[in-house]
Image (tube, helix red, strand yellow):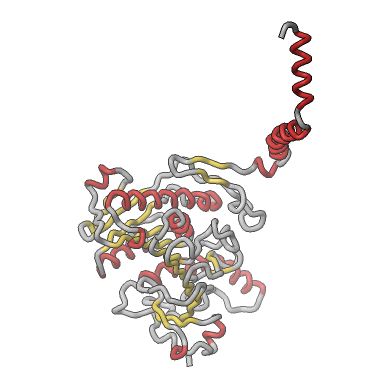
């Protein structure tokens, strides 16, 4: 073009030749990102959520479904520096733990045996994992009856108060358990079907977070999975039957809220067991039977304290179930505990299974509920509990 006027006229003619839709599409493309930025800027709730990246474990979002105004009013990100120990016991070292790390060097010096099935024992809230902890008793009995790789997962640096932070930390601990399992699978050739996670309280949900990262994981046993922040929660938030090929759950302190109990009451596995109804366990007694105001106050206080007894009893039932030469926790399939107590599910016409370690996955479609009675004193197993009449 020979002059500025010629250039100006040429541009105007070109723009005039374009269809109106060309400009509309361009404006729409500009509006969308600006609209998104404005909406986020004026939504204060959105500003409360974080999406924290932790090491090589991925992102951990604190918004829904991990936030819920009623069930999970405080949603925190997990610790950004998780410190979890994997204490390994095998037939070669049944007493002295080998601290397995996720490195080839550690594995080369390890007692891990890829020809054996592998068990992971995962504790819950406020456990100090002293050597009198039930996890060590469980490990001892497992290695007494068979040959296994038994890991005791130590996340005691992250399981204390405040409870909401411990809840958040289960997500990253579960991710680390999954990372360890993937490492062992890749380096030793073990299959996911050969792995069994056994978790109590928050440890049950930790197992679920691990399982969702491992397609085809063999089994998860949830021992009275924690209720506060998990009852009525979305499946992504809690242990559920999609986290492993087989998920069995023992409920001993189930309730709809924290005042009633520390465990989940709803059936969340393929098979759910409710010993003594799943809410109150024999031997975990209250202090007063009086109808006075004082008696009621005593009962309320002791009920809160005794929840710990009911909640922990799932550990003892599972421990006792390992050695079937002593007794079997025979359980009856029934639609409710009331029906079970009334004899509406007679053993001769009902499915009978062993609660605990030796349980096999039934063919019935989940959820399947089983009921049984126990004794107040140890051993708690009451083999003839199915005979109610």
Residue at point 44%, 55% (across, down)? 210
Vertically, is 122 above or below 357?
above
Is residue 285 in view from this perspective?
no
**Picture coordinates of residue 246, whole percent (x, y):** 42, 67
* Vertical position of residue 264 compared to residue 4: above or below: below
Q: Residue 17 vs residue 284: left or right?
A: right
Count of labels in the image: 0
In the rendered view, does 233 fall on the left or right side of 81?
right
Point 55% across, 81% down: residue? 335
The image quarter containing residue 45 is: top right
The answer, for residue 354, to whether it is visible in the render is yes
* Residue 337, quarter of picture: bottom right
Q: Is residue 228 above or below residue 356?
A: above
Q: Residue furthest top?
A: 2
Percent coordinates x, y for residue 189 in the rendering: 28, 54
Which residue is at 25% across, 54% downward? 112
- Across and down, in percent, residue 375 comes to 43, 80
> In the figure, 388 relative to 210: above or below?
below
Residue under the image location 48 percent in, 72 percent down: 272
* Residue that protrudes farthest toward the bottom in the picture: 389
Q: Quick check: 32 left or right of 243?
A: right
Compare residues 194 and 252 and report the one nearer the observer: 194
- Indicate the position of residue 364 as horizontal and vertical percent values: 47, 77
Looking at the picture, tell me which residue is in the foreground, 348 or 205. Answer: 348
* Quarter that holds the N terminus: top right
Of 263 and 330, the residue lying toward us: 330
């Amino acid at each position: 073009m020979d002059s500025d006027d010629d250039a100006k006229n040429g541009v105007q003619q070109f723009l005039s030749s374009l269809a109106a839709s060309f400009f509309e599409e361009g404006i729409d493309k500009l509006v969308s990102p600006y609209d998104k930025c404005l909406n986020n800027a004026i939504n204060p709730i959105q500003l409360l959520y974080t999406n924290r990246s932790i090491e090589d474990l991925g992102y951990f979002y604190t918004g829904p479904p991990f936030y819920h105004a009623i069930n999970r009013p405080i949603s925190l990100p997990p610790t950004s520096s998780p410190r979890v120990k994997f204490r390994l016991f095998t037939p070669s070292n049944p007493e002295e733990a080998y601290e397995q790390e996720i490195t080839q060097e550690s594995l080369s010096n390890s007692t891990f045996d890829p020809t054996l099935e592998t068990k992971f024992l995962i504790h819950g809230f406020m456990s100090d994992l002293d050597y009198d902890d039930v996890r060590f008793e469980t490990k001892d009995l497992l290695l007494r009856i068979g040959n296994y790789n038994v890991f005791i997962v130590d996340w005691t640096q992250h399981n204390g108060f405040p409870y909401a932070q411990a809840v958040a930390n289960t997500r990253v601990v579960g991710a680390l358990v999954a990372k360890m399992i993937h490492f062992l699978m890749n380096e030793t050739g073990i299959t996911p079907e050969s792995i069994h996670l056994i978790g109590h309280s928050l440890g049950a949900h930790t197992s679920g977070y691990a399982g969702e990262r491992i397609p085809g994981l063999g089994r998860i046993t949830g021992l009275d999975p924690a209720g506060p922040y998990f009852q009525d929660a979305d499946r992504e938030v809690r242990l559920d039957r999609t986290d492993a090929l087989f998920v069995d759950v023992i409920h001993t302190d189930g309730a709809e809220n924290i005042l009633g109990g520390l465990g989940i009451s709803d059936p969340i596995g393929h098979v759910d067991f409710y010993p003594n109804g799943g809410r109150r366990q024999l031997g975990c007694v209250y202090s007063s039977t009086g109808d006075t105001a004082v008696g009621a106050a005593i009962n309320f206080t002791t009920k809160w304290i005794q929840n710990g007894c009911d909640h922990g009893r799932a550990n003892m039932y599972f421990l006792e179930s390992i050695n079937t030469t002593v007794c079997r926790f025979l359980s009856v399939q029934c639609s409710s505990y009331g029906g079970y107590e009334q004899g509406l599910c007679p053993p001769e016409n009902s499915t009978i299974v062993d609660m605990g370690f030796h349980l096999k996955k039934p063919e019935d479609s989940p959820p399947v509920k089983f009921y049984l009675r126990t004794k107040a004193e140890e051993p708690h197993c009451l083999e003839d509990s199915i005979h109610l009449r």
